[in-house]
Amino acid sequence: MEQENVTRLMHEGKTIVLVGTAHVSRHSADLVERVIDEEQPNTICVELCRSRYEAIKQKDAWEATDIFKIIRRKQTALLLSQLLMASVQKKLADKFGIRPGDEMLRAVLKAEKIGSDLVLADRDIRTTLTRTWRKIGFISKIRLFFETVMSLVFDRDISEQDIEKMKNKDMLEIALASFGQKLPGAKITLIDERDRYLARSIAAAPGPKVVAVVGAGHVPGILKNLDKDIDIAPLNEIPPKSPWGRAIAWGLSALVIAIIVTGFIQGGAARSLDMLKWWFFVNGTLVGLGALAVLAHPATIAASIAAAPLTSLNPMMAAGWVAGITEASLRKPQVRDVISLRDDISTIKGFWHNKITRVLLVVVFVNVGSSLGTFIAIPLMMKYLWL
Protein backbone atom coordinates (compact mmCIF):
# COMPACT_ATOMS: atom_id res chain seq x y z
CA MET A 1 0.00 0.00 0.00
CA GLU A 2 1.14 3.57 -0.70
CA GLN A 3 2.27 4.90 2.68
CA GLU A 4 2.47 8.61 1.93
CA ASN A 5 -0.49 10.47 3.53
CA VAL A 6 -1.65 7.19 5.13
CA THR A 7 -1.17 6.65 8.88
CA ARG A 8 -1.82 3.22 10.42
CA LEU A 9 -2.07 2.79 14.20
CA MET A 10 -3.60 0.62 16.89
CA HIS A 11 -6.09 2.11 19.32
CA GLU A 12 -7.81 0.12 22.07
CA GLY A 13 -7.55 -3.13 20.13
CA LYS A 14 -8.69 -1.78 16.77
CA THR A 15 -6.75 -0.82 13.66
CA ILE A 16 -7.26 2.75 12.52
CA VAL A 17 -6.04 3.88 9.10
CA LEU A 18 -6.01 7.68 8.68
CA VAL A 19 -6.03 8.92 5.08
CA GLY A 20 -5.02 12.57 4.83
CA THR A 21 -6.38 14.29 1.74
CA ALA A 22 -6.45 17.61 -0.07
CA HIS A 23 -10.09 18.51 -0.73
CA VAL A 24 -9.41 19.28 -4.40
CA SER A 25 -7.09 16.53 -5.58
CA ARG A 26 -7.49 13.72 -8.07
CA HIS A 27 -4.70 11.76 -6.36
CA SER A 28 -6.44 12.07 -2.98
CA ALA A 29 -9.69 10.69 -4.37
CA ASP A 30 -7.86 7.80 -6.05
CA LEU A 31 -5.90 7.11 -2.87
CA VAL A 32 -9.08 6.89 -0.80
CA GLU A 33 -10.56 4.25 -3.08
CA ARG A 34 -7.32 2.28 -3.18
CA VAL A 35 -6.92 2.23 0.61
CA ILE A 36 -10.51 1.14 1.17
CA ASP A 37 -10.23 -1.60 -1.46
CA GLU A 38 -7.07 -2.96 0.16
CA GLU A 39 -8.16 -2.62 3.79
CA GLN A 40 -11.81 -3.72 3.47
CA PRO A 41 -12.63 -1.94 6.76
CA ASN A 42 -15.59 -2.64 9.01
CA THR A 43 -16.21 1.11 9.35
CA ILE A 44 -15.43 4.14 7.21
CA CYS A 45 -15.31 7.57 8.87
CA VAL A 46 -15.55 10.68 6.73
CA GLU A 47 -14.97 14.35 7.52
CA LEU A 48 -18.61 15.21 6.93
CA CYS A 49 -21.55 16.21 9.09
CA ARG A 50 -25.15 15.29 8.30
CA SER A 51 -25.84 18.54 6.45
CA ARG A 52 -22.78 18.28 4.22
CA TYR A 53 -23.43 14.57 3.64
CA GLU A 54 -26.95 15.28 2.41
CA ALA A 55 -25.63 18.10 0.21
CA ILE A 56 -23.18 15.87 -1.68
CA LYS A 57 -25.47 12.84 -1.80
CA GLN A 58 -28.53 14.72 -3.03
CA LYS A 59 -26.84 17.33 -5.14
CA ASP A 60 -29.63 17.97 -7.65
CA ALA A 61 -32.37 18.15 -5.05
CA TRP A 62 -30.28 20.44 -2.85
CA GLU A 63 -29.51 22.84 -5.67
CA ALA A 64 -33.22 23.12 -6.48
CA THR A 65 -34.08 24.14 -2.92
CA ASP A 66 -35.65 27.58 -2.51
CA ILE A 67 -33.32 29.80 -0.48
CA PHE A 68 -36.31 31.17 1.43
CA LYS A 69 -36.84 27.64 2.77
CA ILE A 70 -33.17 27.42 3.70
CA ILE A 71 -33.47 30.64 5.72
CA ARG A 72 -36.66 29.44 7.36
CA ARG A 73 -35.03 26.10 8.26
CA LYS A 74 -32.01 27.92 9.72
CA GLN A 75 -29.62 26.40 7.18
CA THR A 76 -28.02 29.69 6.17
CA ALA A 77 -24.66 28.67 7.66
CA LEU A 78 -24.57 25.65 5.38
CA LEU A 79 -25.49 27.89 2.46
CA LEU A 80 -22.61 30.18 3.33
CA SER A 81 -20.19 27.28 3.50
CA GLN A 82 -21.29 26.12 0.04
CA LEU A 83 -20.82 29.64 -1.26
CA LEU A 84 -17.26 29.78 0.05
CA MET A 85 -16.35 26.32 -1.20
CA ALA A 86 -17.88 26.96 -4.60
CA SER A 87 -16.15 30.33 -4.90
CA VAL A 88 -12.69 29.29 -3.74
CA GLN A 89 -12.47 25.73 -5.10
CA LYS A 90 -14.36 25.86 -8.37
CA LYS A 91 -11.43 27.14 -10.40
CA LEU A 92 -9.19 24.37 -9.08
CA ALA A 93 -11.86 21.74 -9.57
CA ASP A 94 -12.44 22.77 -13.17
CA LYS A 95 -8.72 22.93 -13.85
CA PHE A 96 -8.00 19.44 -12.57
CA GLY A 97 -11.26 17.77 -13.57
CA ILE A 98 -12.48 16.81 -10.09
CA ARG A 99 -15.32 17.93 -7.85
CA PRO A 100 -14.44 19.55 -4.50
CA GLY A 101 -14.87 16.91 -1.80
CA ASP A 102 -14.87 14.08 -4.32
CA GLU A 103 -12.68 11.98 -2.02
CA MET A 104 -15.41 12.10 0.64
CA LEU A 105 -18.09 11.11 -1.86
CA ARG A 106 -16.00 8.21 -3.09
CA ALA A 107 -15.53 7.02 0.49
CA VAL A 108 -19.30 7.18 1.06
CA LEU A 109 -20.00 5.22 -2.11
CA LYS A 110 -17.34 2.64 -1.21
CA ALA A 111 -18.95 2.14 2.21
CA GLU A 112 -22.25 1.41 0.51
CA LYS A 113 -20.63 -0.94 -1.99
CA ILE A 114 -18.66 -3.10 0.43
CA GLY A 115 -21.20 -2.92 3.27
CA SER A 116 -19.07 -1.01 5.76
CA ASP A 117 -20.62 1.09 8.50
CA LEU A 118 -20.45 4.80 7.69
CA VAL A 119 -19.65 7.33 10.41
CA LEU A 120 -20.17 11.05 9.77
CA ALA A 121 -17.33 12.12 12.01
CA ASP A 122 -17.39 15.90 11.77
CA ARG A 123 -19.29 18.45 13.85
CA ASP A 124 -22.34 20.07 12.26
CA ILE A 125 -21.10 22.90 10.08
CA ARG A 126 -23.77 25.26 11.41
CA THR A 127 -22.43 24.74 14.93
CA THR A 128 -18.85 25.30 13.77
CA LEU A 129 -19.61 28.53 11.94
CA THR A 130 -21.85 29.89 14.71
CA ARG A 131 -19.24 29.15 17.38
CA THR A 132 -16.59 30.80 15.22
CA TRP A 133 -18.64 33.95 14.68
CA ARG A 134 -19.67 34.23 18.34
CA LYS A 135 -16.19 33.66 19.77
CA ILE A 136 -14.04 35.93 17.63
CA GLY A 137 -13.87 39.65 18.43
CA PHE A 138 -15.09 42.52 16.29
CA ILE A 139 -11.66 43.22 14.79
CA SER A 140 -11.23 39.53 13.97
CA LYS A 141 -14.64 39.51 12.28
CA ILE A 142 -13.54 42.40 10.08
CA ARG A 143 -10.28 40.64 9.24
CA LEU A 144 -12.05 37.35 8.55
CA PHE A 145 -14.47 39.12 6.23
CA PHE A 146 -11.62 40.95 4.48
CA GLU A 147 -9.57 37.79 3.96
CA THR A 148 -12.65 35.93 2.68
CA VAL A 149 -13.35 38.69 0.17
CA MET A 150 -9.72 38.68 -0.93
CA SER A 151 -9.87 34.92 -1.47
CA LEU A 152 -12.93 35.37 -3.65
CA VAL A 153 -11.56 38.28 -5.66
CA PHE A 154 -7.94 37.29 -6.17
CA ASP A 155 -6.95 33.92 -7.58
CA ARG A 156 -3.47 32.50 -7.36
CA ASP A 157 -2.33 30.20 -10.15
CA ILE A 158 -1.98 26.90 -8.28
CA SER A 159 -0.57 23.82 -9.93
CA GLU A 160 -1.53 20.22 -9.16
CA GLN A 161 1.92 19.83 -7.55
CA ASP A 162 1.04 22.69 -5.19
CA ILE A 163 -2.13 20.87 -4.14
CA GLU A 164 -0.24 17.66 -3.46
CA LYS A 165 2.32 19.62 -1.41
CA MET A 166 -0.56 20.87 0.74
CA LYS A 167 -0.78 17.32 2.09
CA ASN A 168 2.73 17.56 3.49
CA LYS A 169 2.20 17.75 7.22
CA ASP A 170 5.07 20.10 7.98
CA MET A 171 3.98 22.67 5.41
CA LEU A 172 0.37 22.42 6.46
CA GLU A 173 1.16 22.85 10.13
CA ILE A 174 3.15 25.98 9.27
CA ALA A 175 0.21 27.30 7.25
CA LEU A 176 -2.22 26.62 10.08
CA ALA A 177 0.13 28.28 12.57
CA SER A 178 0.23 31.36 10.35
CA PHE A 179 -3.56 31.38 10.15
CA GLY A 180 -3.74 31.02 13.90
CA GLN A 181 -1.55 34.08 14.43
CA LYS A 182 -3.91 36.18 12.31
CA LEU A 183 -7.18 34.84 13.71
CA PRO A 184 -6.49 32.75 16.80
CA GLY A 185 -10.17 32.61 17.79
CA ALA A 186 -11.16 31.33 14.38
CA LYS A 187 -8.40 28.70 14.37
CA ILE A 188 -9.63 27.34 17.69
CA THR A 189 -13.17 26.72 16.46
CA LEU A 190 -12.47 25.91 12.82
CA ILE A 191 -9.50 23.61 13.35
CA ASP A 192 -8.56 22.75 16.95
CA GLU A 193 -12.07 21.95 18.20
CA ARG A 194 -12.82 19.89 15.12
CA ASP A 195 -9.56 17.97 15.60
CA ARG A 196 -10.87 16.89 19.00
CA TYR A 197 -14.34 16.16 17.66
CA LEU A 198 -12.99 14.07 14.79
CA ALA A 199 -10.63 12.21 17.11
CA ARG A 200 -13.51 11.34 19.45
CA SER A 201 -15.71 10.17 16.56
CA ILE A 202 -12.98 8.02 15.05
CA ALA A 203 -12.00 6.51 18.40
CA ALA A 204 -15.64 5.57 19.07
CA ALA A 205 -16.22 4.10 15.60
CA PRO A 206 -17.33 0.43 15.75
CA GLY A 207 -15.48 -2.56 14.37
CA PRO A 208 -11.92 -3.94 14.55
CA LYS A 209 -10.74 -2.01 11.48
CA VAL A 210 -11.56 1.64 10.70
CA VAL A 211 -10.54 3.78 7.73
CA ALA A 212 -10.90 7.51 8.39
CA VAL A 213 -10.84 9.97 5.48
CA VAL A 214 -10.02 13.48 6.68
CA GLY A 215 -8.34 16.63 5.42
CA ALA A 216 -4.60 16.35 5.83
CA GLY A 217 -4.56 19.41 8.07
CA HIS A 218 -6.53 17.54 10.71
CA VAL A 219 -4.26 14.49 10.88
CA PRO A 220 -1.71 15.92 13.39
CA GLY A 221 -4.52 17.14 15.68
CA ILE A 222 -6.38 13.83 15.47
CA LEU A 223 -3.22 11.89 16.38
CA LYS A 224 -2.63 14.26 19.29
CA ASN A 225 -6.16 13.81 20.68
CA LEU A 226 -6.93 10.18 19.82
CA ASP A 227 -5.96 8.80 23.23
CA LYS A 228 -7.63 11.57 25.22
CA ASP A 229 -10.98 11.31 26.99
CA ILE A 230 -12.88 14.00 25.08
CA ASP A 231 -16.29 15.30 26.12
CA ILE A 232 -17.94 16.54 22.91
CA ALA A 233 -20.92 18.17 24.66
CA PRO A 234 -19.07 21.48 25.25
CA LEU A 235 -17.92 21.43 21.61
CA ASN A 236 -21.56 21.43 20.50
CA GLU A 237 -22.65 24.33 22.69
CA ILE A 238 -23.55 27.65 21.05
CA PRO A 239 -22.01 30.58 22.98
CA PRO A 240 -24.40 33.42 23.79
CA LYS A 241 -24.25 36.58 21.73
CA SER A 242 -22.13 39.42 23.02
CA PRO A 243 -24.31 41.75 25.12
CA TRP A 244 -22.55 44.89 23.88
CA GLY A 245 -24.04 44.99 20.40
CA ARG A 246 -27.56 44.51 21.71
CA ALA A 247 -26.97 47.06 24.49
CA ILE A 248 -25.87 49.70 21.97
CA ALA A 249 -28.83 48.95 19.70
CA TRP A 250 -31.34 49.18 22.52
CA GLY A 251 -29.57 52.30 23.80
CA LEU A 252 -30.08 54.06 20.45
CA SER A 253 -33.74 53.04 20.42
CA ALA A 254 -34.17 54.37 23.95
CA LEU A 255 -32.42 57.60 22.95
CA VAL A 256 -34.79 58.17 20.01
CA ILE A 257 -37.85 57.54 22.19
CA ALA A 258 -36.46 59.82 24.91
CA ILE A 259 -35.91 62.61 22.37
CA ILE A 260 -39.50 62.31 21.14
CA VAL A 261 -40.92 62.25 24.69
CA THR A 262 -38.81 65.23 25.71
CA GLY A 263 -39.97 67.12 22.65
CA PHE A 264 -43.59 66.39 23.62
CA ILE A 265 -43.00 67.68 27.16
CA GLN A 266 -41.32 70.84 25.90
CA GLY A 267 -43.45 71.70 22.89
CA GLY A 268 -46.45 69.42 22.85
CA ALA A 269 -47.72 67.07 20.18
CA ALA A 270 -46.75 69.38 17.31
CA ARG A 271 -43.07 69.25 18.21
CA SER A 272 -43.10 65.48 18.65
CA LEU A 273 -44.85 65.15 15.31
CA ASP A 274 -42.14 67.23 13.63
CA MET A 275 -39.51 64.93 15.13
CA LEU A 276 -41.36 61.83 13.91
CA LYS A 277 -41.62 63.33 10.43
CA TRP A 278 -37.84 63.66 10.27
CA TRP A 279 -37.38 60.14 11.63
CA PHE A 280 -39.69 58.61 9.04
CA PHE A 281 -38.46 60.80 6.18
CA VAL A 282 -34.72 60.27 6.72
CA ASN A 283 -34.96 56.54 7.43
CA GLY A 284 -37.39 55.85 4.62
CA THR A 285 -35.49 57.95 2.08
CA LEU A 286 -32.05 56.45 2.73
CA VAL A 287 -33.36 52.91 2.87
CA GLY A 288 -35.32 53.44 -0.32
CA LEU A 289 -32.25 54.87 -2.05
CA GLY A 290 -30.21 51.88 -0.87
CA ALA A 291 -32.70 49.42 -2.34
CA LEU A 292 -33.03 51.48 -5.52
CA ALA A 293 -29.24 51.61 -5.96
CA VAL A 294 -29.15 47.83 -6.48
CA LEU A 295 -32.31 47.79 -8.63
CA ALA A 296 -34.40 45.92 -6.09
CA HIS A 297 -37.93 44.89 -6.99
CA PRO A 298 -40.39 47.82 -6.60
CA ALA A 299 -42.27 45.86 -3.94
CA THR A 300 -38.99 45.39 -2.05
CA ILE A 301 -38.30 49.12 -2.18
CA ALA A 302 -41.79 49.86 -0.85
CA ALA A 303 -41.48 47.24 1.92
CA SER A 304 -38.08 48.62 2.92
CA ILE A 305 -39.34 52.19 3.14
CA ALA A 306 -42.34 51.11 5.20
CA ALA A 307 -40.30 48.93 7.56
CA ALA A 308 -37.22 51.12 8.12
CA PRO A 309 -38.63 53.63 10.65
CA LEU A 310 -40.01 50.77 12.76
CA THR A 311 -37.16 48.27 12.46
CA SER A 312 -34.67 51.01 13.38
CA LEU A 313 -36.41 51.21 16.75
CA ASN A 314 -36.49 47.43 17.22
CA PRO A 315 -33.05 45.74 17.53
CA MET A 316 -34.76 42.38 17.11
CA MET A 317 -35.42 43.19 13.45
CA ALA A 318 -33.58 44.86 10.57
CA ALA A 319 -34.74 46.64 7.48
CA GLY A 320 -32.26 44.61 5.45
CA TRP A 321 -33.83 41.40 6.73
CA VAL A 322 -37.28 42.55 5.61
CA ALA A 323 -35.87 43.64 2.26
CA GLY A 324 -33.93 40.41 1.79
CA ILE A 325 -36.91 38.18 2.58
CA THR A 326 -39.13 40.23 0.27
CA GLU A 327 -36.60 40.16 -2.55
CA ALA A 328 -35.97 36.44 -2.11
CA SER A 329 -39.71 35.77 -2.17
CA LEU A 330 -40.12 37.73 -5.39
CA ARG A 331 -36.93 36.72 -7.22
CA LYS A 332 -36.92 33.15 -5.80
CA PRO A 333 -33.16 32.49 -5.93
CA GLN A 334 -32.03 28.89 -5.65
CA VAL A 335 -28.88 27.21 -4.43
CA ARG A 336 -27.80 26.65 -8.04
CA ASP A 337 -27.31 30.44 -8.08
CA VAL A 338 -24.80 29.98 -5.25
CA ILE A 339 -22.96 27.30 -7.20
CA SER A 340 -22.70 29.60 -10.24
CA LEU A 341 -21.83 32.68 -8.20
CA ARG A 342 -18.07 32.25 -8.66
CA ASP A 343 -18.52 32.53 -12.43
CA ASP A 344 -21.24 35.16 -12.34
CA ILE A 345 -19.27 37.74 -10.35
CA SER A 346 -16.58 37.75 -13.02
CA THR A 347 -18.82 39.80 -15.36
CA ILE A 348 -21.11 42.78 -14.82
CA LYS A 349 -23.98 40.97 -16.53
CA GLY A 350 -23.53 37.88 -14.38
CA PHE A 351 -23.17 39.99 -11.25
CA TRP A 352 -26.58 41.52 -11.77
CA HIS A 353 -28.15 38.37 -13.15
CA ASN A 354 -27.32 36.11 -10.21
CA LYS A 355 -30.27 36.12 -7.81
CA ILE A 356 -28.12 35.41 -4.76
CA THR A 357 -25.92 38.40 -5.49
CA ARG A 358 -28.98 40.58 -5.91
CA VAL A 359 -30.47 39.51 -2.58
CA LEU A 360 -27.14 40.00 -0.77
CA LEU A 361 -26.75 43.46 -2.28
CA VAL A 362 -30.28 44.40 -1.26
CA VAL A 363 -29.67 43.31 2.34
CA VAL A 364 -26.33 45.14 2.59
CA PHE A 365 -27.44 48.40 0.95
CA VAL A 366 -30.72 48.57 2.85
CA ASN A 367 -28.99 47.94 6.18
CA VAL A 368 -26.40 50.60 5.39
CA GLY A 369 -29.17 53.02 4.51
CA SER A 370 -31.00 52.19 7.72
CA SER A 371 -27.87 52.73 9.84
CA LEU A 372 -27.12 56.04 8.15
CA GLY A 373 -30.75 57.05 8.58
CA THR A 374 -30.60 56.47 12.32
CA PHE A 375 -27.42 58.47 12.87
CA ILE A 376 -28.53 61.32 10.58
CA ALA A 377 -32.08 61.52 11.93
CA ILE A 378 -31.10 61.71 15.62
CA PRO A 379 -29.30 65.10 15.43
CA LEU A 380 -32.03 66.46 13.16
CA MET A 381 -34.60 65.51 15.79
CA MET A 382 -32.49 66.85 18.66
CA LYS A 383 -32.39 70.37 17.19
CA TYR A 384 -36.05 70.73 18.19
CA LEU A 385 -35.05 70.43 21.85
CA TRP A 386 -33.36 73.85 21.67
CA LEU A 387 -36.18 75.71 19.92
Image (cartoon, helix red, strand yellow):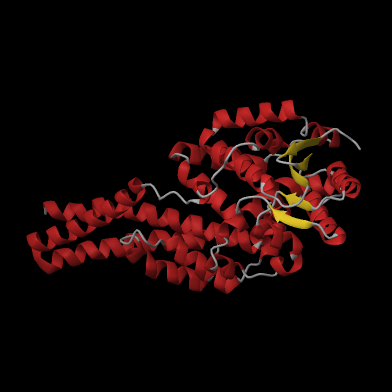
Nearer to me, 360 or 159: 159
Q: Looking at the picture, how far across and down is residue 230, in whole percent?
A: 57, 42
Left of 43 or right of it: where is 289? Answer: left
| Residue farthest to the left, as pictured | 266
Q: Is residue 296 visible?
A: no
Q: Residue at x 17, y 64 (%)?
A: 272
**Percent of width and height locating residue 224:** 65, 32
Residue at horizontal 47%, vertical 51%? 238
| Quarter occupied by residue 118 | bottom right
| In the foreground, 190 or 317 | 190
Quarter of the figure with the N terminus: top right
The reply, left or right, for residue 2 in relation to residue 372 is right
Compared to residue 96, the image places residue 80 above or below, namely: below
Residue sitting at x 81%, y 48%: 93
Where does the C terminus fall, quadrant-wise? bottom left
Place of residue 256 in the rendered image (x, y in percent of width and height, measured from the top left): 23, 57
> In front here: 292 or 300?
300
In the displayed structure, 255 sits above or below 147; it is below
Using residue 111 as the reference point, say whether residue 365 is left or right of it: left
Q: How many numbered circles does the render carry?
A: 0
Q: Say left or right for 370 vs 123.
A: left
Closer to the camera in the image, 40 or 152: 40
Query: Residue 67's image quarter?
Result: bottom right
Residue 231 can be seen in this image: yes
